[in-house]
Amino acid sequence: IDLKVCERGPDGYLQLSEGRGVRFIDTDEGLETFFSCQVGVLCLCALDAEWPPVFSNDGTRRRRGHTQAATLAQLALVDESRAHHFVVIDLMKISPAFVKQHIIQAIFECSDVVKVGYSLWQDVKAVVVSTTSSSTEGGHHHQNH
């Protein structure tokens, strides 16, 4: 798999190569269309998930006994045609069923897809937690479809 998709810019930072945009998805239809029409059979997925920090009453950051629900998932994907796809998914606006179908089952439960990431297991757990009913309370505004 050719992973040369970044070039160093004049400022010294890595830049996506020409013609490689990042897609932002914040609807169920957008997620379904992206995975069913624009991405071929996946070979590789890099994941980075984001979630809000948890602070104690005194304002210091603390660890909790359970995994926080992810609010954003950033994916870099390579499909069998060697096409590269970069996507940011707003997990607060996508219904849990679509996240389960298109991200958890199609990517993370598929042994044919190579998964990479820093603290990958923690990020995958945070995406899974975002699909549970208790994590959708208090700020998650899933669409009804």
Image (cartoon, rainbow, N blue to C red):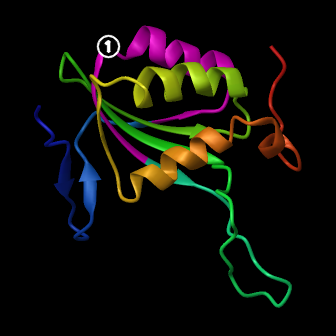
Q: Which residues are magenta?
A: 23-47
Number of residue marks: 1
Residue 104, given in percent of the width and then of the height, sits at 51, 29
Residue 142, given in percent of the width and then of the height, sits at 80, 31
User: Residue 13 falls in which quadrant of the image?
Assistant: bottom left
**Nearer to the camera, 122 or 19:** 122
Residue lying at the far top in this picture: please name it: 37
Residue 41, given in percent of the width and then of the height, sits at 30, 14
**Nearer to the camera, 123 or 89:** 123
- Asked if residue 4 lies left or right of residue 29, the reply is left
**Residue at the (43%, 31%) spot, across then down:** 108
**Nearer to the camera, 119 or 44:** 119
User: Residue 1 falls in which quadrant of the image?
Assistant: top left
Q: Above or below — where is 15 with respect to 46?
A: below
Q: Above or below — where is 46 with respect to 44?
A: below
Q: Which residue is mark 1?
A: 40
Q: Amino acid at mark 1?
A: Gly
**Residue at the (18%, 23%) spot, across then down:** 82
Residue 111, given in percent of the width and then of the height, sits at 31, 25
Q: Above or below — where is 57 with respect to 54?
A: below
- Asked if residue 49 lies left or right of residue 8, the reply is right
**Residue at the (44%, 50%) spot, across then down:** 121
